[in-house]
Amino acid sequence: MAKLNPPAAALLVAIAPLLASCAPAGTAEPGAAALTPRQAERLDRQLAGKVAGAPIKCLPNYRSSDTIRVSDSILLYRSGGNLVYRNDLKSSCPGLARDSDIMVVRQFGSSTCEGDFFHLVDRSSGIRGPTCVFGEFVPYRKPAGDAG
């Protein structure tokens, strides 16, 4: 093990709090590295008590009743109280988390699929924002027999 000289050790002690503040917030789930504490809490609350299943490529429209924007890279689709689909976008979609822009989904058929894209439109000006691409849909379900 290498021994640090006193000035190097003092520098390391001084910058340790700065390095610790760079640690990502939120859960260790994929796509969670850039979550703010508030976003991580929202994600954790929506997925609490649920277990991830095998990812699916397409989500039929009738399967989701509510879209929740967690961050610029994570969407949740609620399908009743016991099932939530998580979508980690292919890359970040700047402005998605603001939840003020309108999501315009380019859809082919009756399902939204991995690789399909959508764009954001500013609600007040009508100006089109970034184009974003869906990832896989991961179902999170309450385990069988879990009433709560």
Image (tube, rainbow, N blue to C red):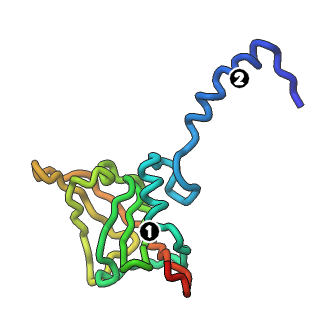
Q: Which of the pair 46/28 is nearer the observer? A: 46
Q: Which of the pair 139/125 is nearer the observer? A: 139
Q: Exactly how many numbered labels are in the figure?
A: 2
Vertical comparison of 33 with 78: above or below? above
Answer with the quarter of the image where residue 135 lies.
bottom left
Query: Pointer 2: residues within 10 angstroms few (<14), some, or many (20+)?
Result: few
Query: Residue 86's mark?
Result: 1
Which residue is most to the bottom? Answer: 145
Q: Where is residue 67 in the image (x, y as percent from the top left)?
A: 31, 68
- Tell me the quadrant of the picture where the N terminus can be found: top right
Which residue is most to the top? Answer: 7
Vertical comparison of 67 with 125: above or below? below
Q: Which of the pair 8/111 is nearer the observer? A: 8
User: Could you tell me the amino acid type at mark 1?
Assistant: Arg
Q: Position of residue 101 (x, y in %)?
A: 21, 54
Which residue is most to the front? Answer: 148
Q: What is the spatial separation of the Cα atoms under label 1 and label 2, in whole angstroms?
A: 40 Å
User: Could you tell me the amino acid type at mark 2?
Assistant: Leu
Query: Residue, x 44% and y 73% (percent of image)?
Result: 137
Q: Which of the pair 14/147 is nearer the observer? A: 147
Q: Position of residue 22 (x, y in %)?
A: 56, 36
SS assignment at label 2: helix
Q: Name the residue under label 2.
A: 12
Query: Residue, x 36% and y 79% (percent of image)?
Result: 79
Going from N to C along the chain, the mark reached first, 1 or 2, is: 2
Query: Pointer 1: residues within 10 angstroms few (<14), some, or many (20+)?
Result: many
SS assignment at label 1: strand
**Residue 119 appears left or right of 82:** left
Query: Residue, x 62% and y 28% (percent of image)?
Result: 17
